[in-house]
Amino acid sequence: MRASPLAGVRVVALEQAVAAPLCSRHLADLGAEVIKVERPGRGDFARDYDAYVLGESAHFVWLNGGKKSLALDLKTAEGRDVLVRLLRDADVLVSNLGPGALERIVPDEELVALNPRLVRCAISGYGPSGPYQYRKAFDLLVQGEAGVTASTGEVGHPAKPGVSLADVGAGIYAAAGILAALFRRERSGVGDRVEIAMFDVMVEWMSPLLLTYREAGIEIEPAGTRHATITPYGPFGTADGRTINIAVQTTRQWLDLCDVLGLDDLAARVDLCENAGRLAQRDLVERAVAEATGHRALSDLADRLEEAGIPWGTLNSIADVSRHPQLNDTVRWRTAVLPSEAEVTVLDSPFHPEGRSGENRVPALGEDSTDVLARLGYAPDDIERLLRDGTVAAAVAGGTT
């Protein structure tokens, strides 16, 4: 078996919530050793989001499998010294602390002097400059600022997507930026600084809508589950009370759909052959499609669409997805061990990494503190002293020491 892509890479993560933990989890998926630095006592506040997974937070279980937890008080001089010693031989530092927090703990120029090979990745709400640079940012706030919620839902009824897009997007871009910096380091021998702003990620994804407004003066209105600028592209009801998604993007697909649904009169209309023409008469097109799908059962309609090569899908509930044949007929599941030693089945990484080894353990707060200190060269007496004075906290599986 080949070694994992990031085998031998050590990542120090000063992280909380979703964005940075998702980034470092992907690095762990690819074989990196990830040391998660948490506050003694409470730790990453995502630990307390809920208790749906055998007493653990669903978000925390999702984001933190395969990591090590070091509970360290960074407000103390000795806590900072531990962090500096840890970073001296690290490959990557990931952080999404509040604005300016990391700079107050260890300024970037000090990090460069300490470890010139270190890749430093900072995830923030709005980046290191500009009038919003010191604003605290959470997913909802950034989606609102970037226009995502206004472009989602129905006209007059903005909606936040059920997935934390700003957090997830920032975490993925951060992981990509880190991988690029590590690749550059292989050639240059020196590390780099990666800055990822959640706002930048969201406005990047809003680019088609922003370009349309800036260049054409048109503010695209939200279209619910339909596509804002393509039709027919959305959900349609069936005779058996189900919903099918149909996605037509080309003239050929439109004509094939008309053939499947018996819409010969619409197929004959030249003004509806291209999407722009259909969009100009959206109500007519979508009403005709909906009426036709409403006379057919989902299974029959799906078979005919599939045979005609027309893109389609079902509008699934979360319960439906948990039973999805594609999800359950592929190797997408693995076991995670919780702090209580209970085991749960979780989704595996979309990377499908080869060569990964080691237990997929979700760490208790401070579970690896003493091991990390010992590896850094701290003597047993010094470790005991740091535990006594609260600079470091330790835990074992199932409870705190």
Image (spheres, rainbow, N blue to C red):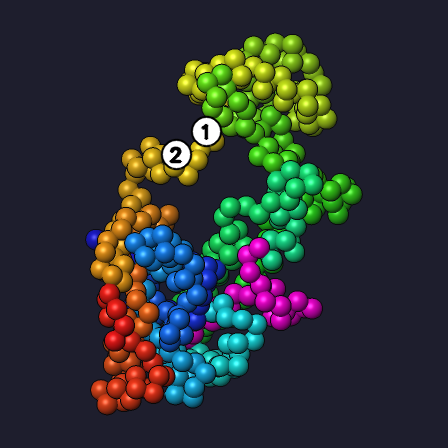
- The image quarter containing residue 297 is top left
Label 2 secondary element: helix
Image quadrant in which you'd find residue 152: top right
Considering the whole magenta stretch, tell me its main secondary structure: loop
Q: Which residues are magenta?
A: 117-140
- Give yes or no for contact between labels 1 and 2 (Cβ–Cβ under 8 Å): yes
Q: Amino acid at mark 1?
A: Thr
Numbered marks: total: 2
How far apart are the two marked residues, 1 and 2, measured between alpha carbons?
10 Å
Categorize mark 2 by other alpha carbons within 10 Å: few (<14), some (14-19), many (20+): few
Q: Residue at x 56, y 29 (%)?
A: 234
Residue beneath the point at 69% across and 41% down:
156
Q: Determine the secondary structure under disc 1.
A: strand
Residue at the limit of the structure toward the right, as seen here:
217
Q: Position of residue 376 (x, y in %)?
A: 29, 82
Residue 27 seen in render: no
In front: 27, or 347?
347
Query: Along the line of sight, which residue is nearer the eye, 3 or 152?
Result: 152
- Identify residue type, mark 2: Asp
Instruction: Residue 124: give x, y in percent of width and height.
Output: 55, 66
- Image quarter in which the C terminus is found: bottom left
Q: Residue at x 46, y 29 (%)?
A: 313
Q: Which residue is mark 2?
A: 320
Specify the quadrant of the image occupied by residue 80.
bottom left
Please provide percent x and percent y for residue 361: 27, 60
Residue 314 circle label: 1
> 116 and 284: which one is in front?
284
Q: Residues within 10 Å of mark 1 (few under 14, many from 20)?
A: some
User: Does 232 appear above or below 370?
Assistant: above
Q: Position of residue 169 (x, y in %)?
A: 51, 54
| N-terminal label among 1 and 2 | 1
